[in-house]
Amino acid sequence: YVWDYGVLLSNDEKRYIQVMVQTRFGEGHELFTELLFTSQQFIRSIEEKYSVSLRDVKRAIKLVSFFEGSLRTRSGSGHSRVNKNYPPPDGSSRINLQIRCYILALSLCYQSRIYDQDTRKEYRQEMIK
């Protein structure tokens, strides 16, 4: 049997994404919530309405955690390929690291599934709005 569970309403989906992000990272990650929600909508607009789900959101959240740990480890390991001046010594380093992790996770979960280069560019343009 095949069950049609339907699709979440936009407001409900956004709220679920917000709760998932807050549960994992706490407060202060509204930007990531918006990026995830917009990514979900964008993929639906170019594929089928069932082509993305909250599993994709969960995957992106896990990847942000992974990249955060990986980049922190690399910056403190003294590895020869790591730029010693990165992250910058001012207070923006945490924000820069967080944004880098968002970009990496969204690239893997959403952008990589877009074949057409022009559509990928459209996706990136949506993300910077």
Image: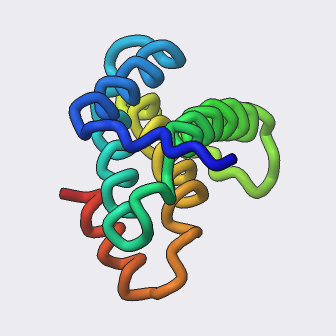
Identified at 39% across, 33% down, the residue is 95
Image position, residue 112 (x, y; %): 58, 68
Q: Nearer the viewer, residue 120 or 14?
A: 14
Identified at 57% across, 34% down, the residue is 58
Look at the image and tell me in which quarter the C terminus lies.
Answer: bottom left
Q: Is residue 41 visible?
A: yes
Identified at 69% across, 35% down, the residue is 66
Exactly how many numbered labels are in the figure? Answer: 0
Q: Nearer the viewer, residue 51 or 74?
A: 51
Relative height, residue 84 to residue 42 (above, below):
above
Relative height, residue 83 to residue 45 (above, below):
above
* Residue 14 lies in quadrant: top left
Image position, residue 70 (x, y; %): 72, 38
Q: Residue furthest front?
A: 1
Image position, residue 63 (x, y; %): 63, 40
Relative to 26, is 74 on the left or the right?
right
Relative height, residue 51 to residue 90 (above, below):
below
Q: Is residue 101 visible?
A: no
Identified at 43% across, 12% down, the residue is 26
Q: How is the image coloured?
A: rainbow
Image position, residue 89 (x, y; %): 46, 32
Relative to 77, is 94 on the left or the right?
left
Q: Nearer the viewer, residue 103 or 59?
A: 59
Q: Residue furthest left?
A: 129
Relative to 76, is 43 on the left or the right?
left
Relative to 58, is 102 on the left or the right?
left
